Image: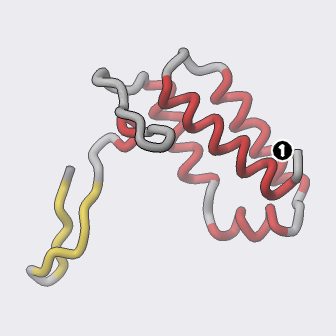
């Protein structure tokens, strides 16, 4: 974890390798580091869930739905790991929330 300071005042923190810490609820993350494929998928996830895409999903934009489905398929291809399952469930929840599917 890195501490963040702005003008010599503590202003927050950043997790190093956040994909290592993905969990559902109050689970403990696995002790081993996340596979590279999960790290890559997590970066895709972070770049997808932006305010712009939230607005497009609220408008039921078909192209954004397609991108969301592609992310789901990528997550299904990952090695079995509780972190990839947590990420897949979140993406699926968002798909159902915005598109009812």
Find numbered disc 1 in the image and state the secondary structure of the residue it sits on: helix
Work out whether 74 lies above or below 77: below
Residue shown at 58% from the left, 29% from the top: 85
Image quarter in which the C terminus is found: top right
Compared across the picture, whether 28 is left or right of 75 comes to left
Work out whether 95 lies above or below 58: above
Image quadrant where residue 26 sits: top left
Count of numbered circles in the view: 1
Residue shown at 35% from the left, 33% from the top: 28
Q: Percent position (x, y) of residue 87? A: 57, 38
Q: How is colour applied across the structure in the image?
A: secondary structure
Q: Which residue is mark 1?
A: 66
Image quadrant where residue 52 sits: bottom right
Compared across the picture, whether 2 is left or right of 82 comes to left
Work out whether 84 lies above or below 21: above
Residue shown at 79% from the left, 39% from the top: 69
Work out whether 72 lies above or below 58: above
Direction bottom: furthest residue: 7
Direction top: furthest residue: 79
Q: Percent position (x, y) of residue 68? A: 75, 45
| Foreground of the two, 75 or 21 | 21
Q: Percent position (x, y) of residue 33? A: 32, 25
Residue shown at 63% from the left, 35% from the top: 88
Image quadrant where residue 11 sits: bottom left
Direction left: furthest residue: 8
Classed neighbour count for the residue bearing mark 1: other residues with Cα under 10 Å, few (<14), some (14–19), many (≥20):
few
Q: Percent position (x, y) of residue 18? A: 37, 43
Compared across the picture, whether 100 is left or right of 11 comes to right
């Amino acid at each position: 974890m890195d501490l963040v300071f702005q003008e010599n005042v503590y202003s927050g923190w950043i997790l190093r390798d956040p994909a290592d810490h993905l969990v559902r609820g109050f689970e403990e993350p696995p002790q081993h580091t996340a596979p590279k494929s999960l790290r890559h998928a997590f970066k895709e996830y972070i770049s997808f869930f932006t305010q712009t895409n939230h607005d497009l999903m609220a408008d039921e934009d078909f192209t954004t739905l397609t991108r969301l489905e592609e992310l789901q398929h990528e997550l299904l291809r990952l090695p079995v790991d509780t972190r990839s399952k947590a990420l897949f469930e979140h993406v699926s929840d968002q798909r159902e929330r915005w598109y009812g599917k």
